[in-house]
Amino acid sequence: NAGVMQNPRHLVRRRGQEARLRCSPMKGHSHVYWYRQLPEEGLKFMVYLQKENIIDESGMPKERFSAEFPKEGPSILRIQQVVRGDSAAYFCASSPQSGTPDTEAFFGQGTRLTVV
Amino acid sequence: GEDVEQSLFLSVREGDSSVINCTYTDSSSTYLYWYKQEPGAGLQLLTYIFSNMDMKQDQRLTVLLNKKDKHLSLRIADTQTGDSAIYFCAESGAGGFKTIFGAGTRLFVKA
């Protein structure tokens, strides 16, 4: 059973381009969470999704950022018109049901986005 | 707002005990977690404690919670070089998914 798979591991984009980050949850997991880690900081919650539904997007910037988790395929975090301040590591986690300690959320290895 | 604070760096000798401290502000926190992040990797859940507990022990790990002071600590006994990593303290309310993380404590173990 492969773990949470994120790709690409590293992504370089010029200012103004679009960045698409993909996350394939663990087999059997239907809940996906996205976090952003800025340099020297902890993880900041961005969005929580179930299949075809956004449950909580209170941590998402109001503009340029969007997320989806379609019925088939990976979850996508999309950043339009990237700026230098978007440079960060973006982590995805998945769990089989709403997060409680008994249903541990497993993290992917992250996508490191660099905006030049 | 909700906040979790930790010291940024800790250095210990191999074989000694490590104690990593954390404070949080949300009095409604239900679960408190310790995660480990190795270089280039995602986060691994080490242990967690419910807010109605004072202590939890799991092999070399001991978690102490002082709910009155909103203070959480992680003690690693007989620290090994393989324990060198960043340790994140985190808290969440009921439901668990909107977890608030600290900035992480970098543990450096000297042989």
Image (cartoon, helix red, strand yellow):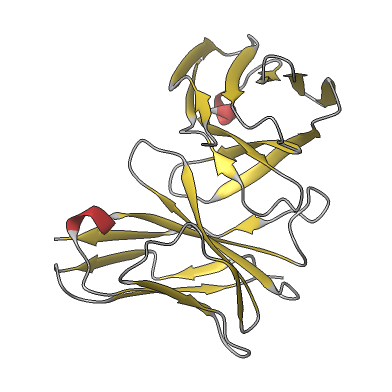
Looking at the image, which is closer to me, B66 or B75? B66
Task: Tell me if A99 is positioned left or right of A82 in this view.
Answer: right
Residue B89 seen in the current view: yes
Task: Tell me if B104 is positioned left or right of B72 in this view.
Answer: left
Task: Tell me if A44 is positioned left or right of B23 in this view.
Answer: left
Residue A76 seen in the current view: no
In the rendered view, would you say B49 is above or below B13? below
Give the residue at x 76% y 67%: A96
Give the residue at x 49% y 26%: B105
Looking at the image, which is closer to me, A115 or B15? A115
Q: Quadrant of residue B21?
A: top right
Q: Position of residue B64 (x, y in %)?
A: 75, 18
In the rendered view, would you say A86 is above or below B52? below
Q: Position of residue A98 (x, y in %)?
A: 75, 62
> Which residue occupies the extreme front position in the image?
B1
Q: Position of residue A78 (x, y in %)?
A: 37, 75
In the rendered view, would you say A61 is above or below B67? below
Give the residue at x 77% y 66%: A97
Looking at the image, which is closer to me, B17 or A13? A13
Q: Position of residue A89 (x, y in %)?
A: 38, 54
